[in-house]
Amino acid sequence: MGDVGGLIFIWAFPFLFALFSLSEKHTFWKGLGLGYLCGLGFWLLNLKWLLRMADLDFVPLGGAIFAWLLLPAYLALYFGIFGALVAKWGNPWKATQPKLFKTRIDEKIAAKQQQQKNSSNKLLESFKESTTSLRFAFMHASLWTLLEWVRSILFTGFSWNGLGVAFYDIPVLAQSAELVGVIGLSFAPMFVTSVVFQVLCRMVKEVRVGRMKPHFDLIVAGLLIAAMFGFGISRLFSLTSAETKDVGFLLIQQNLSLDQKHAASSHIGNMSDYTQASLEGLENVHDANKATFTAFQNNPESEGEVALDRIDFIVWPESTLLRGVSINQETNVPYFTEVESNALTEIISQGSHGLITGANEYHFANEVELFSNPPSSSYNSIGLFRGIPGESMLESIYRKNHLVIFGEYIPYRDTFPLLEKIVGASHGSALGPNYSPGGDTEPMKTLHDNEELHLIGAVCFEDTVGRLTRQSVRDADQVIVNVTNDGWFGNCEEPKQHYANALFRTIELRRPMVRSANTGISCIINVKGSMENEDGSLNAIVNEQGEYFTKGSLHAYAHILKSAPITLYALAGDWFAAACAVIYLFTLVSSLKQRAA
């Protein structure tokens, strides 16, 4: 996926240089405009995969372009706010001198005057400069982190691709997400960038006047990275040697296009394919176990027990049960269409394993409405099926809480009918009723080896929303289960970005994650935030060319820590991001007081 995470420590150099170089007049508005343009460019490139929706038969090109322009136009506002506040009150040079760089003659004169004034106290002078540098670095980093946190909440929230996500391929630095969350990780690169930028500017001046000084702020920045590195090494070492309980999963990925997945004419064939792939996976494990047991029996030196593979759960992706689960709210009895009922029955009747699948869920007030009226409410859900085939086979269900705006619901659609018409036109078809948020974060509970096991549900991109997933953490054996459908965007960078954002849930909460995608990246992520095994192989569905966009299955294990901790992030959530509001206000007031003096 590309090993470029280290670039996160230098990306903001030109951005900060441009902000600090703005003239005094209308600095706030110039910073706002500059920041907005930078953000717009960033997000247009970052989210260009939205245009791939136009490849679908039911999404017109105009609709895809509208989505691609609208979302970046909103997200760029946060860059703009950062630019405005930094340009106006966060410029280290505005507090001490009118320009970022003076002429060489001015610098020599100023340096000579300062040297004569304080020639015997070079260390004190360096300490004061470093203190000022650190104050502004804290201001910049806390403001950026605070804005990322607000972005993750406002208008239902979009926490995608913050600075901290760049550590997805630097595991040793990513481990600190256990303490501060992935949003909190964004503080470090902005802090280091601000310090290094200020130090480089001072060093240019020092070289020109021939008077080098120590830079204590650079030491502080280095200590921050060293602390993160040390914590990461310690946690990776302890997690590698920790005892685990293993839960076996069989993931099925059919690599269906959205046109094929959503077409009514394809549904029977799709269900048959999922069923057949699952039965083949069960048979493969059975045959492998039979061969292992036979070899064990035929070896006269064999002693003790033989270890056999197992499948505890089969996992199908989001909305596989396209026609859904219909619930009579009077009796709470689920009803299924014949094709889906037959598929469920065939799978769960093969053994004691469970079937976890994405399902559309429809609620009706009573049995009369069940067959004659539209549902009173609809949900995008995950169902756990096992036990006796029939009505009782739905053991537990999780309903999606974090809905996709304009995709799964239209806000104020009754108040503003024009909005529904616009969204409908962008989709190229009439829109169905809004999905409802589930309103409950309780994990799905079941048994594994006669002990309670919790399955933390995450539908679609909910696995990128740490503040939601943490609400399901309990003092119990737990696995995060994500069913998703990245087929909206074809073979592009979106599923890879999705994976990079999702893996931080396993670090923040120290619970493994099982991901089943219609297409994209179906894998098992361990509690260190990686889908790599110790031998370097991948716990993911890939073809011989190493491509994730393929049809296939994966039998692998999720390793649950025997004494799984309740991490600081699980307990306190984005506490550090909230604390950044206090840090920002403190550093801002301090800088304003110094400037006034």
Image (cartoon, rainbow, N blue to C red):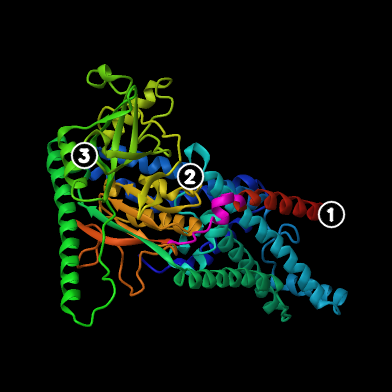
- Please state, as top left, top right, bottom left or bottom right, where the C terminus lies in the image: bottom right
Q: Specify whether 61 is left or right of 297.
A: right
Can residue 95 be seen? yes
SS at circle 2: helix
Label at residue 389 = 3
Q: Name the residue under label 2.
A: 468
Quarter residue 289 falls in: bottom left
The reply to whether residue 15 is in sight is no
**Depth check: 468 or 105 in front?**
468
Q: Residues within 10 Å of mark 2 (few under 14, many from 20)?
A: some
Other-residue count near label 3 (Cα within 10 Å), few / some / many at <14 / 14–19 / ≥20? some
Residue on which disc 1 sits? 597
The mark found on residue 79 in the picture is: none
Quadrant assignment, res 220: bottom right
- Percent position of residue 92, x then y: 70, 60
Q: Position of residue 181 (x, y in %)?
A: 53, 55
**440 versus 225 height, above or below:** above
Q: As shown in the figure, which amino acid type bears the numbered disc 1?
A: Ala
Q: Which residue is drawn at 32% across and 47% down?
A: 484
Mark pair 2, 3: CA separation:
33 Å
What residue is drawn where x is 49% and y is 54%? 162
Viewer-side residue, 245 vs 86: 245
Q: In this view, does 282 lie to the left or right of 530?
A: left
Q: Give the extent of the magenta segment.
A: 561-575
